[in-house]
Amino acid sequence: MPQQTTYRLAFIGFGAVGQGFARILFERGDWLAQRYGAKLVVVAVSTRRGSLYDPDGLDLGQLLQAVEQDGQLPQSKARVDWTPQELVERVTADVLVEVSATDLTTGEPATTYIRTAFNRGMHVVTANKGPIALHGQVLLKEAQDEKVYLGYEGTVMSGTPALRLGWSDLAGCTIHEVSGILNGTTNYILTQMEAGSAYADVLAEAQRLGYAEADPSSDVEGFDAAGKAAIIANMVFGANLRMEDVACQGITQITLDDIAEARAARERWKLIARVAQQDGQVVASVSPQRLPLSHPLAGVNGPTNALTYTTDLLGEVTLVGPGAGGIATGFALLADVLAVHGV
Ligand code: HSE
């Protein structure tokens, strides 16, 4: 068995993604310790409905059962009267798991939680798009200055390694363009609408399945995909785009008639995000497009996402995989924590 290192994890937020990560740890924590020598212990969870802290580790089974049953944290001796910010300031932990609700306008309060964690010497893993889309490069620099790790793989395509592919695996290539389907909710809605379901019903189902944002207008108006385009532009291309620099149009105008019209023409609507080098500048956009059924992205359906990197040395490299969901995004957090461990 490899030498064991213990990582104490503190969660801020415990929605679909936080629960997904906790469930992975509950079900395979022992195996992770055996296989990689990384013992991952959840010592704290803080939500708007209360906080728990036990330096010896929370009972994950009890926690998941209580939250899945009625959305509340369990009554336990680990209850503390701390706000999320107070918890980040006081907890003794090695890694902050920042999975509170995304705000793509201010990046707050998550950005403050992340900075507080850095200042206290904690690594941060996050699936929160706001802080990375708005301040990713600055936060990465701050993490480097504090000699801690900032993991953000789950911000684009959930656990599918879309960012790592760009900044690590394709290092040495020049990337000309990255384009694809980057929002699971809208791709699921478009797929189900083609099967005849009404927009409002499918959106409700996407919320129930944990694909949609807390405020799903961010998904359907294209803002979520625009945030991911900004993350790719800034963190993979090294650009300095703001959210308002990403031209953005969502799917709210697409009707069942539009979908039927496309089908008759052997085409399919997809919400396409694109980041490209153009005349020495990086440009980014999100817009619905009618693709011929023969197009590779036309066959990517449901909450699945896909991304094509166009490079000089390899030509096109396409990655297809889950784009949303609690377990799929929880996996991204696991991959980031294992990266802290050196895996
Ligand atoms: N709401 C997002 C989506 C979640 O549907 O893609 C993953 O970022």
Image: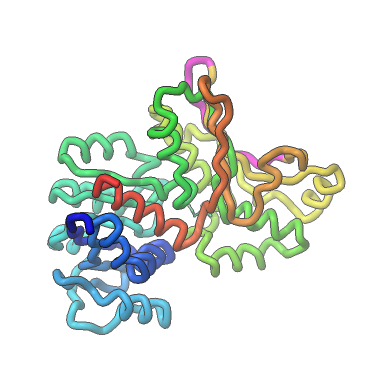
Q: Quadrant of residue 231?
A: top left
Residue 211: x, y in percent? 52, 60
Q: Compared to 189, does 181 lie above or below? A: above
Residue 324 lies, with reference to residue 26, above or below; the image says above
Of residue 218 and residue 97, the one placed in the foreground of this image is 97
Is residue 138 visible to the viewer in this orientation of the structure? yes
* Residue 141 among those drawn in magenta: no
Report the side of 7 relative to 65 (left or right): left
What residue sits 75% from the left and 56% below the top? Answer: 194
Q: Quadrant of the image for the N terminus?
A: bottom left
Q: Position of residue 6 (x, y in %)?
A: 18, 59
Q: Residue furthest front?
A: 1
Give the farthest residue toward the right: 264
Residue drawn where x is 76% and y is 60% of the image? 195
Q: Residue furthest top?
A: 279
Magenta stretch, residue numbers: 279-289
Does residue 205 appear left or right of residue 89 in this picture? right
Q: Is residue 76 left or right of residue 105?
A: left
User: Percent position (x, y) of residue 332?
Assistant: 40, 52
Identify which residue is drawn at 28% across, 55% down: 36
Residue 198 lies left or right of residue 49; in this view the side is right
Q: Residue at x 52, y 45 (%)?
A: 225
285 part of magenta stretch:
yes
Q: Quadrant for residue 273, please give it.
A: top right
Query: What colouring does the structure picture have?
Result: rainbow
From where the camera sits, is residue 88 visible? Answer: no
Residue 81 in percent (x, y) is at: 18, 74
Rendered view: 36 above or below 180: below
Magenta stretch, main secondary structure class:
strand
